[in-house]
């Protein structure tokens, strides 16, 4: 039998999912992440998976990996020694940036750090104008001086971003050729290859990010691929930020494409969870050990944005622009907050309780794990309130110390604030819930969607613990908890198609453009995309090419992405495109101006190749009820009475399909815990999915 593996590295745990391609049966194992050596963590997880499933490497035909290497490199500032070469007079584009401010009224806010120090930002004489005409030829006699500088300063990676190179790339290509021939051990990224698109700052930033993280990602993949090969595993794919997987070779061409690798896999998995139970309008909610992430899925399709920042000192609020480094690539629209199970609770100098952004992570982890943690976390609060099993977690494989959690809450929170450890735990949960509600509102309400119209898909080790409370506050009526929710993101890896996006600036007023030129540009992009798809070995009958255009009204600063009509682009297509843009503008901003000219900014191709479809099968409930319950004291965070409630605790594997449970109660499984409050009903779907009706009157 053949199997697929998905490997997802989280801040606390590494998850490995194996799927039998014939039966669709899913198995998930979890190990502690190893922040100092992620390659080792992946190999440890693979060996544990082999021991658990008895599936040898020779039976594995496909591996997909969600990596945090790019994100961690940016957050920790451990990237390559990077230089930037740009047009003379434009060396400070990275420092001038946009006027976006993360804290609008804070006059003393520090700007984001700069990836490339000023003395490593070099200039070369050349100039192309906004129409693509050469005003000043490339000064070839200056290249030797640049190469000597790069050699003397031991530069490991070079980003090249010349003015208007997206219209005329020849100068960048010539310079890149000289650099690659003279500095074979130095990685060179050209903006015309990374992002041939308008907007100088974003293009420069994206190219600089690729150069900064490229050598780190390359070494990681080299080490990991070598180890996989030595153990008999096949080559792997990487999850891309915009959904879909890419080969390591494609990832190294534009490393920024895998900056949100793991979270994107979770959204893909949420779509699968919705398909299983018949829901297409979803909000994915993934709460792990370090962060909580939310994303909106409309009619089975995730929302994608190209306005994204990563890294920076204020990374706890990734939807706020002005904190980090912009990367103008397609990224699934995810709001991420530092609100995971490992988020640390603390009292600030003003005697106010805070939760996060610092996390205990995998090392040392929450206090109750006994790995050296001394500061109370959300997991410690959940344990003290009775949500989690006080004897063990992970199906008995992780012993916990509830007394240590209580003592840390008393010493760190209770004594400074004059409250009990129970009151401290309730306050921690309320604060972290408020933070996660805000993340969900960002991807729904602030995007023009009412959360009431969506079902909440809760996964991650801590997601189902908090999901019902979030749904109640947002008015969401249905919560979906998929099987194996604690490692569910990894399942998105093995069910994702190969996918990559291509873009070209086409800066013209739509009504004045020549449809023949538009068609020609689309075909050029498709030729490039087909070259990538050919390398996958997937049959051409499973290839898909989707055309879209970035459009705006003249004088607007931002674009909306609109799908192009099918077939060859013609005058009729142009009329349809304009109409579609007006409607999209109305939907997004609440108005449209049909008399206003529409401007094309960029053309895009989304290329994908479908993997063989898997009929995913989870182990559902038993055929007959084996009611093995215990009773546990549970303190609900919104309760005013300090006395606990006696709540039944059910084992998920003992509940039959079709069963209905009424809250308050706890449903435990090896990978996560579901907390049902008063007026909640939980129905067990035949797939093993738990569907919760929130605030039911039944």
Image (tube, grey):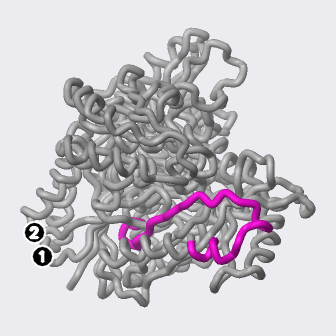
Res. 364 visible in picture: no
| Farthest-out residue, top | 349
Q: Position of residue 26 (x, y in %)?
A: 33, 74
Rendered view: 100 above or below 353? below
The answer to whether residue 495 is magenta is: yes
Residue range of the region highlighted in magenta in the rendering: 491-520
Q: Are marks 2 and 1 in contact (CB under 8 Å)?
A: yes
Instruction: Say what secondary structure mark 1 lies in.
Output: helix
The answer to whether residue 518 is magenta is: yes
Mark with earlier residue (2, 1): 1
Rendered view: 301 above or below 42? below
Which residue occupies 72% across, 19% down? 105
Left or right: where does residue 509 sit relative to residue 122? Answer: right
Q: Which residue is at the front of the view, 532 or 278?
A: 532
Instruction: Say what secondary structure mark 2 lies in.
Output: loop
Which mark, residue 58? Answer: 1
């Amino acid at each position: 039998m053949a199997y697929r593996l998905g490997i997802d590295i989280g801040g606390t745990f590494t998850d490995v999912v194996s799927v039998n391609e014939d039966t669709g049966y899913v198995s998930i194992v979890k190990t502690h992440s190893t922040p100092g050596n992620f390659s080792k963590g992946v190999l440890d997880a693979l060996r544990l998976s082999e021991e658990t499933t008895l599936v040898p490497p020779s039976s594995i035909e496909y591996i997909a990996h969600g990596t945090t290497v790019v994100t961690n490199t940016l957050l920790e500032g451990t990237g390559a020694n990077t230089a930037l070469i740009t047009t003379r007079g434009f060396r400070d584009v990275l420092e001038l940036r946009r006027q976006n401010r993360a804290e609008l009224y804070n006059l003393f806010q520090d700007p984001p750090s700069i990836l490339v120090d000023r003395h490593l930002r070099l200039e070369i004489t050349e100039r192309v104008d906004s129409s693509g005409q050469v005003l000043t030829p490339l000064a070839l006699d200056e290249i030797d001086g640049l190469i000597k500088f790069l050699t003397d300063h031991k530069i490991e990676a070079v980003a090249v971003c010349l003015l208007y190179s997206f219209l005329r790339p020849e100068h960048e290509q010539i310079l890149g050729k000289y650099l690659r021939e003279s500095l074979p051990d130095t990685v060179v990224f050209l903006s015309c290859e990374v992002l041939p698109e308008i907007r100088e700052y974003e293009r420069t930033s994206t190219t600089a990010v690729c150069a900064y993280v490229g050598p780190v990602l390359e070494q990681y993949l080299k080490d990991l691929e070598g180890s996989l090969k030595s153990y008999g595993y096949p080559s792997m794919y990487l999850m891309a930020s915009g959904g879909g997987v890419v080969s390591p070779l494609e990832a190294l061409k534009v490393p920024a494409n895998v900056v949100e690798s793991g979270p994107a896999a979770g959204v893909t998995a949420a779509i699968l969870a919705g398909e299983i139970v018949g829901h297409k309008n979803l909000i994915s909610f993934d709460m792990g050990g370090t962060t909580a992430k939310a994303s909106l899925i409309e009619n089975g399709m995730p929302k994608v944005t190209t306005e994204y920042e990563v890294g920076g000192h204020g990374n706890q609020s990734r939807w706020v622009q002005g904190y980090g480094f912009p990367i103008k690539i397609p990224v699934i629209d995810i709001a991420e907050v530092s609100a995971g199970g490992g988020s640390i609770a603390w009292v600030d100098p003003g005697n106010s309780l805070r939760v996060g952004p610092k996390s205990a992570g995998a090392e040392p982890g929450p206090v109750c794990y006994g790995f050296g943690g001394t500061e109370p976390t959300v997991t410690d609060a959940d344990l003290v309130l009775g949500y989690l099993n006080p004897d063990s977690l992970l199906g008995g494989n992780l012993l916990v110390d509830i007394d240590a959690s209580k003592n840390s809450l008393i010493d760190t929170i209770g004594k400074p604030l004059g409250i009990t450890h129970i009151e401290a735990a309730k306050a921690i949960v309320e604060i972290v819930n408020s933070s996660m509600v805000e993340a969900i509102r960002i991807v729904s309400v602030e995007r023009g969607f009412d959360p009431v119209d969506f079902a909440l898909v809760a996964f991650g080790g801590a997601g189902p613990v908090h999901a019902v409370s979030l749904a109640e506050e947002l008015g969401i009526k249905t919560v979906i908890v998929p099987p194996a929710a604690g490692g569910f993101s990894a399942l998105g890896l093995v069910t994702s198609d190969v996918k990559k996006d291509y873009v070209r600036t086409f800066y013209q007023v739509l009504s004045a453009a020549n449809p023949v030129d538009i068609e020609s540009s689309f075909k050029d992009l498709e030729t490039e995309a087909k070259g990538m798809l050919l390398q996958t070995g997937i049959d051409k009958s499973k290839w898909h090419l989707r055309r879209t255009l970035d459009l705006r009204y003249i004088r607007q600063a931002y674009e909306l992405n609109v799908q192009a009509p099918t077939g060859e682009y013609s005058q009729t297509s142009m009329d349809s495109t304009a109409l579609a843009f007006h409607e999209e503008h109305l939907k997004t901003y609440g108005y449209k101006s049909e008399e206003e000219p529409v401007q094309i900014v960029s053309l895009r191709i989304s290329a994908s190749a479908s993997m063989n479809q898997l009929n995913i099968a989870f182990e559902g409930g038993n055929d007959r009820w084996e009611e093995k319950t215990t009773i546990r004291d549970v303190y609900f965070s919104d309760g005013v009475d300090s006395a606990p409630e006696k709540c039944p605790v059910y084992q998920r594997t003992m509940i039959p399909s079709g069963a209905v449970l009424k809250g308050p109660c706890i449903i435990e499984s090896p990978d996560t815990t579901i907390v049902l409050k008063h007026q909640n009903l939980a129905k067990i779907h035949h797939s093993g999915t738990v569907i919760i009706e929130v605030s039911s009157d039944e």
